[in-house]
Amino acid sequence: MLLNQTHRKKFTFSWLAIFYLLAVYKWWQGMWLYQADPFMFVTRFDGITWQLLQTGFHRFVMQQSEARYVADVIFYGLPLVYGILFLRNPLMAAKLAWLWLVANWLYVQLYTSYPINSIEAHIAWLLFPVLFAMASLPSYYYILQALRYFFLYFFVSAGIWKLVQGGAFYPGQMSAILLEQHKEWLVSSTTYWHAEFIYWLIDMPLVSFLLYWMGILIELFFVVGFFTKRYDHVLIALFILFLGFDYFIMRIPYFEVAPFLLTLWHGRYREPVNHLPAKEQVLPRQRPA
Amino acid sequence: MFLKEVYRHSKWMFAGMLFFILAQLAVNLKKGMVFSPFFHYGMYSAPQQAMRVYDVNVVTLNGDTLRGKDFSPQKWDKIHFTLQAVLTSSCDSSFYTWQVERLYAKAKVLPAPNAINFVNEGTRQEKMNLYKTWLGKQLGKPGAEIEVHQAGYRYHKANLDYEGPLDIMTQTFPCY
């Protein structure tokens, strides 16, 4: 089936649904910037982040609680404004998406410059506004495919790193990772069933190493997506499984990459043949009579 | 091929994608510094050996130890990431000197960096006091008595056994 405006609409609102589900979840977990209330920052080895740090903006936001509220309002409000505008005036919405891109970049850089979360987990918020900024359907199609390829790369490269760096060939790897990852949690919750399960995994290096390899195989399996879209539904299932295991075993909530799931779901549509000029690429129900 | 189709569609888009691919490859091959949005996704890739003794941070609130099972992963991470950031901030100055200043000097076109934007001010004790105040607020108990200790634990037969106390205020980290 060819990609059309109805698919685009479905994609946009599915994406917004994921974004706001995560927003509620993060609010519940005290992860909004105003809730994090940072008092110090971290200087990571990132040349782009340094440019922001150089301005001193992160120190200003750290000292001004109002600035943190404003940052949250912009970050969590802009997608809603985009969604409303998308229904009324898609071309204007596409223009707004460029502003959204800049706002997201600033917010994510700022948010992750405090010891709250890693920037890698926020890659979806950095990249997706580019897709929403595409006014014409063919451009939208190509950026959607590019994001799908990026997501495949994201997983495959994680698997390759484990082979290249050697973690995949060290049998005690997963036990050591679990100990390092959970030491404070384990020591403080010794008799808790979940901690006992993690202790069991640590004590069974072969089982935990098999789990590590299962992760590697899942990651490497994503290479299939570069050659065919036939197994994208399998990749979606593996992705959800991966997120679940990451949460349960590593206690890493990596849910913020979830929007990429939509690129697999919608990636199956073929290139639209109707190369209308951008101004004519409006939603069907708003097409002029 | 996808890129060929993109080229036919828009040369600007093609150039953008090509730049993205090359930059991502360069960051991967170089392995060191990253440039958002070009990251390494190699966490937990290097062989990791179990340590003889683990330095474990223990936080108490009004005399009671905070237990991991009472917190969601996010909330627990927030407590411990921030504490870890307090401890490792002793490396801020050397990181600034050996990496930030050096690389800015190398880049030449960029204005000289300002240390205050890259280095958290204050001694470890001052930052630890800020941490305790912050944590009290985060836990909904501002002004509560919060203590942070560190102890050595040795892994033995599916358990981490207490080895002895460590001095958290003098703990050192391998800096850059």
Image (tube, coloured by chain):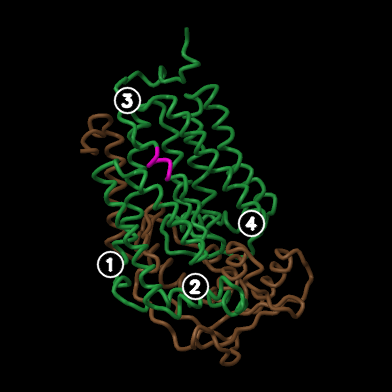
Q: Is residue A257 left or right of residue A270?
A: right
Label whose residue precedes the other's in the sequence (2 or 1): 1
Classify mark 2: helix, strand or loop: helix
Which chain is drawn using green?
A: A
Quarter residue B167 falls in? bottom right
First reached walking from the N terminus: tag 4 or tag 1 = 4
- Per the model, the C-alpha gap separating discs 4 and 1 is 35 Å
Q: Which chain is brown?
A: B
| Residue type for callout 4 | Gln
The amino acid on which the numbered mark 3 sits, given as a three-letter code, is Pro
Q: Which residue is mark 2?
A: A181
Q: Is disc 3 surrounded by few (<14), some (14 to 19) or many (20+) residues within 10 Å?
A: some
Mark 1: which secondary structure? helix
Residue B148 % position (x, y): 66, 79
View extreme (bottom): residue: B164
Q: x%, y% of residue A268?
A: 33, 35
Q: Which residue is mark 4?
A: A29
| Same chain? Circles 4 and 1 | yes
Q: Which residues are magenta?
A: A261-265
Please name the amino acid that badge 2 sits on: Gln
Marks 3 and 4 sit apart, C-alpha to C-alpha, by 41 Å
